[in-house]
Amino acid sequence: MIKQSAYGTEPWRLVEKELDLDLLAQSESIFALSNGHLGLRGNLDEGDPHGLPGSYLNSVYEVRPLPYAEAGYGFPDDGQTAINVTNGKIIRLLVDDEPFDIRYGTLHSHQRILDLRAGTLTREVDWSSPAGARIKVTSVRIVSLTQRAIAAISYTVEPVDAKLRLVLQSELVTNEELPRRGKDPRLSAVLENPLVSEESQCSSDGGPSRALLVHRTRASGLRIAAGMSHAITGPEKMANRIEAYPDLARFTVATQVAPGEQLHIDKFIGYGWSSTRTKPALIDQVVGALAAAHLTGWDGLLAEQRAYLDEFWDGADVELDGDAEIQQAVRFGLFHILQAGARAEYRPIAAKGLTGTGLRRAHVLGYRILRAPGAHVHPAVRRGRRAALAAPGPGRGPTARGRPRPGRGRVPVADDPRPGDLRLLARRYRGVPHQRRHRRRGAPLPGRDRGRRVRAEGRA
């Protein structure tokens, strides 16, 4: 468990003052950023070390078998699991041919800040390599609430006391190596490499350097496209190269930086997915999203994010007097509720939002909001609630009395969800047919209560 002392107490920020590698997986969930469509776990920029790498798209899943020692009536043959899609967060750094890795060398300071009003995750690192080369690294990460297909990273490196040769490698990585999810080798085999490459491309002809990867899930048949483009500032003399392979795209820039100078890169990441649209259409969608992000620029994305959150907090903030920790906890919870459904747009909301894979057999759960009479619910939260109740069926939608009924185990099968586009995985009423029949009639199950009535009559 993470103790409060590791983060301090501030009304609008969550500040991690020191990094505990034993609690890295928990902190990655805390610092996850999402907009309801795209979610990025709070992994370190360089990728290693990590607890659980995670980049998720709402409703992108893979089918996996559900083996049983003894099969029974009504047991499902397969299940659905949210999968880790192409990771666009990675920015690796070499300092005089030494890789930047906090497990080696000397870590003078390490701080991460989740700003609830700006919607950003900021990381500040002061590190010396095993050879003694000292640098300061500052990165700011954002998942846009206004441009739902876009995430962006601002990454700055500065030498402290000597001129250094720096190499930055910005990457797209698919089918990352993940921690084992269970002891069943059949499960690991299905989810180890869930994405199959369809196309990889890169270009640097006169515009920003850009790379794009297209993949398809093996069993569920969903097509996913991920792209990245860059804007670089730094010393006049720089060498750069961009390359793309089936499961990897890499943009590399090398230069020498003196104390007082900086090497700075703005990375824009775009995602798209579909179960029905063609590959060229999906590629055009991602390329268009990246072009719009470049038009807006890094500063423009920050301004849009701040304006969106200012409007949200004006209508949704809860102010408490007397307990700063509870005040921080309430705002942190509201922020993650917003992240889970702000741009879900009539898609289901996953059990853990887009901070992790969530439950395996039924990773989409019912969504319920409890509020005091007269309290105001922000439109973004209402949209998330409507998304959770969008599709009617045995486990969801209005009942005969007009009350909403919480759904269980629904996974979308189309990228354009309409009523009826959600496939039921687990019905509300389980059991063998004669038990379900009695439950629908409102009668007690045969055999379950009969003994109780006999014993009650015997006692009488």
Image (spheres, rainbow, N blue to C red):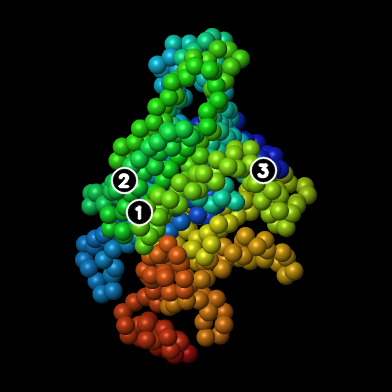
Q: Do the residues labelled 3 and 2 touch (CB within 8 Å)?
A: no
Q: Mark 1 points at which residue?
A: 279
State which quadrant residue 126 falls in.
top right
Q: Is residue 295 above or below residue 275?
A: above
Give the amino acid type for the residue marked by disc 1 in the picture: Lys
Earlier residue among tags 3 and 2: 2
Report the front residue among 380 and 362. Answer: 380
**Going by the image, does 401 lie left or right of 56?**
right
Residue at 49% from the left image edge and 63% from the top image edge: 347
Task: Check disc 2 and report the residue beneath it.
Answer: 199
Q: Residues within 10 Å of mark 2 (few under 14, many from 20)?
A: some
The circle drawn on residue 303 is 3
Distance between mark 1 and mark 3 Cα atoms:
33 Å
Specify which label sits upstream in the sequence, 2 or 1.
Answer: 2
Provide residue 168's location: percent of width, then percent of height: 45, 25
Which one is closest to the eye, mark 1 or mark 3?
Answer: 1
Q: Which of 226 and 439 is in front in this view?
A: 226
Inspect this view and state whether residue 355 appears: no
Q: Are marks 2 and 1 in contact (CB under 8 Å)?
A: yes
